[in-house]
């Protein structure tokens, strides 16, 4: 089983380099056109020259987002995500939404009171302005 391990490692590196070469945008390829790099990776993959050359010099490698080392990244990293309980904008939106809901509830209650009074007047026979139902005998 161990005798197949070197072959599998070479094959894995070859496949990785080939897929990486295919997925790399043309503007990130260095020194040679992308098609030439694909051919080099395919032709010289068995002896690892093609994949190693691609990984070493064929592609523009970018450092970490905030810096080249993890400590620099942590030093320069800004907190982007804030929990809802700590986010003042979210808490303000909850307060605004609550006020809007309360005002809507007050409007509904006032409308309900008005309708109840109108219904009570109709039942009593007193009627009101715009009352088209005849009074009860």
Image (cartoon, rainbow, N blue to C red):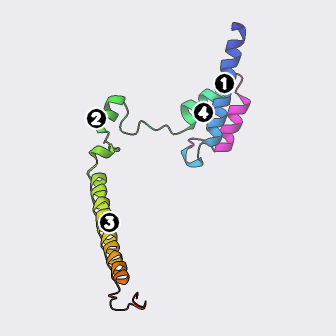
Whether the residues at callouts 1 and 2 have beta carbons within 8 Å, the answer is no
Total residue callouts = 4
Q: CA distance from mark 2 to mark 3?
A: 49 Å
The mark lying in front, picked from 4 and 2, is 2
Q: Please tell me whether mark 2 sits on a helix, a strand or a loop.
A: helix
> Looking at the image, is mark 4 or mark 1 nearer the viewer?
1
Which residue: 63% across, 32% down? 17
Residue 9 in the image, given as x and y percentages of width and height:
65, 19
Q: Position of residue 115 (x, y in %)?
A: 36, 77
Image coordinates of residue 38 in percent, x first then y, are 68, 38
- Front-lying residue, 128 or 78: 128
> Is 31 contained in the magenta span?
yes
Ranked by sequence position, the earlier of labels 1 and 2 is 1
Residue at the spot of label 3: 105
Q: Quadrant of the N terminus?
A: top right
Residue 41: % across, % down: 68, 32
The residue under label 1 is 12
Closer to the observer: label 3 or label 1?
A: 3
Tell me the quarter of the image containing the C terminus.
Answer: bottom left
Q: Could you tell which of marks 2 and 3 lies nearer the N-terminus?
A: 2
Q: Which residue is mark 2?
A: 75
């Amino acid at each position: 089983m161990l005798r197949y391990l070197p072959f599998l490692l070479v094959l894995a590196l070859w496949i990785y380099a080939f897929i990486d070469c295919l997925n790399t945008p043309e503007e990130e390829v260095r020194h040679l056109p992308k098609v030439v790099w694909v051919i080099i990776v395919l032709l010289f993959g068995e002896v690892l020259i093609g994949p190693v050359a691609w990984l070493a010099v064929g592609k523009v490698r970018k450092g970490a987002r905030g810096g080249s080392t993890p400590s620099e990244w942590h030093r320069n990293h800004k907190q982007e995500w804030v929990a809802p309980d700590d986010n003042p904008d979210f808490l303000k939106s909850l307060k605004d939404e609550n006020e809007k809901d309360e005002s809507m509830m007050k409007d509904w209650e006032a409308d309900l009171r008005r309708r109840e009074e109108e219904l009570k007047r109709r039942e009593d026979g007193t009627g009101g302005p715009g009352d088209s139902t005849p009074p009860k005998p």
